[in-house]
Amino acid sequence: MRGAGHGRLRMRTLVTLRWTLILGEVSILLVGGLLLGFRAPFALCFGLIGAAAWINLLTGVASPGQRMIADWEATAQLAFDIAQISILLYLTGGAANPFVLMLIAPVTLAAATLPLQPLLILGGAAVGASIALAFFHMPLPMAHGGAMDLPMSFMLGAAGANVAGIAVIAGSVRQAAAESTRMALALDVTQTVLSREQRLSALGALAAAAAHELGTPLATIAIVAKEMVREAASPQVKEDAELLVAQAARCREILRRLTDAPAEASDEVHERMSLLQLVHEVIEPHAGVKGVRVEAIVTGAAGVASPDIWRMPEVLHALTSFVENAVDFATSEVLITARFDAGSVSMEVRDDGPGFAPEVLAKLGEPYVTTRPGAEGSRTGHIGMGLGFFIAKTLLERTGAVVTFQNGRPRGAVVSARWPRARIEAPTS
């Protein structure tokens, strides 16, 4: 959330917009006057355009282009543009001038970058100008010095069309900008989660490397210390040697617990894992949740060997998040199934709860979509903000998975992820 008055619009953007408007106005007047022979109060029109150009030049020189301007300053600058365009339209036919649509440009920029209150102010000013130009204006210039007074019904229709254009375009841009901001924030959160998981994975690999590298010197220390115990020349030396043996054994035990790996563990243990290890690691944080049985199975096609897969923090975090959600909504059981065949590997998380609500199912995977209960009604104590499924889906898709959400039969929710086997399988040495 931005602080009050802290804009996200650069001065360069406003200056560029104004130069674009000025260039368009000059081009229209030159084409109309020189090529089409229109007769308009060109002295006043070019004087007004020149004043706007001078102000824009001073603005660009006095203020660094990269400066983020405050909301009130952006509102004032865009209000000036609306006023300048409105006066120019007044001189050239008012609402009957087809270029009345230029009033949409400042409002559209406000819809994309400013809070709601400044947008309403600028939109109201543009709408008011459109309506006023239907009643107050100089005649619409025509070729060879003529002028046309159009009926009021046409003027009101033209003004109404412009008002509708302002509302529709500004509203659409506002919605798109808001959705883009929400998506950018959610992606930032996703990247943060991924970075954290990668750091945790790196720590696991570091622990494995430490155990591997320190195992040999610790074994040497233990052997030498035992020889010292047997050949000790005095009780004091023997006591010190026994202390060395005990401390070396303690160090090896600490490393064993740190890596939590089998005796034959090496760095490869932390780089690859079996599907059975994957599902057990995913359900382990939720295996003791009261009232819900969490089970995992691995099944495969006949005659096809079960693959080892790369240990990817994205996959572990995403699947754990899906299991956590299933535990919160399940009635009594959550089942995690890993399946494999010659061409693919898939994971499925299924619960026996009420399933996804229809209005939620259509939008699952988008940010800020949730029906998760608050912490007091959640088995896991997690408070849903609607980012969990978005983050998990995004992380899995980055690994090449196709993620689907559906309701099971007769009840329950089903979340599936499917990979081409080549994308996730760790080749045998």
Image: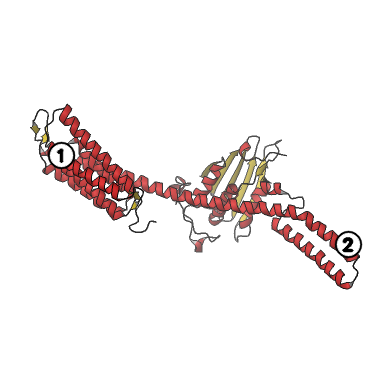
Residue 116, above or below 229: above
Are there few (<14), some (14-19), or many (20+) residues within 10 Å of tag 2? some
Are there few (<14), some (14-19), or many (20+) residues within 10 Å of tag 1? many
The secondary element bearing badge 2 is classed as: helix
Q: Position of residue 397 (x, y in %)?
A: 54, 42
84 horizontally vs 185: left or right: left
Q: Quadrant of the C terminus?
A: top right
The secondary element bearing badge 1 is classed as: helix
Q: Nearer the viewer, residue 218 or 140?
A: 218
Tag shown at residue 227: 2
Q: Position of residue 262 (x, y in %)?
A: 75, 52
| Residue at the front extreme of this rendering | 61
Q: Quadrant of the N terminus?
A: bottom left
Q: Position of residue 371 (x, y in %)?
A: 46, 54
- Which kind of residue does numbered mark 1 sit on? Cys
377 horizontally vs 9: left or right: right
Taking the spot 53% from the left edge, 55% from the top edge, the residue there is 329
Residue 282 in view here: no
Q: Nearer the viewer, residue 22 or 190?
A: 22
- Quarter assignment of residue 19: top left
Residue 97 in view here: yes
Q: Position of residue 250 (x, y in %)?
A: 76, 63
Residue 225, above or below 352: below
Taking the spot 75% from the left edge, 61% from the top edge, the residue there is 251
Report the Cα–Cα distance between label 2 and label 1. 104 Å
Taking the spot 13% from the left edge, 38% from the top edge, the residue there is 43
Q: Earlier in the sequence, mark 2 or mark 1?
A: 1
Q: Nearer the viewer, residue 316 or 336?
A: 316
Tag shown at residue 45: 1
- Which kind of residue does numbered mark 2 sit on? Glu
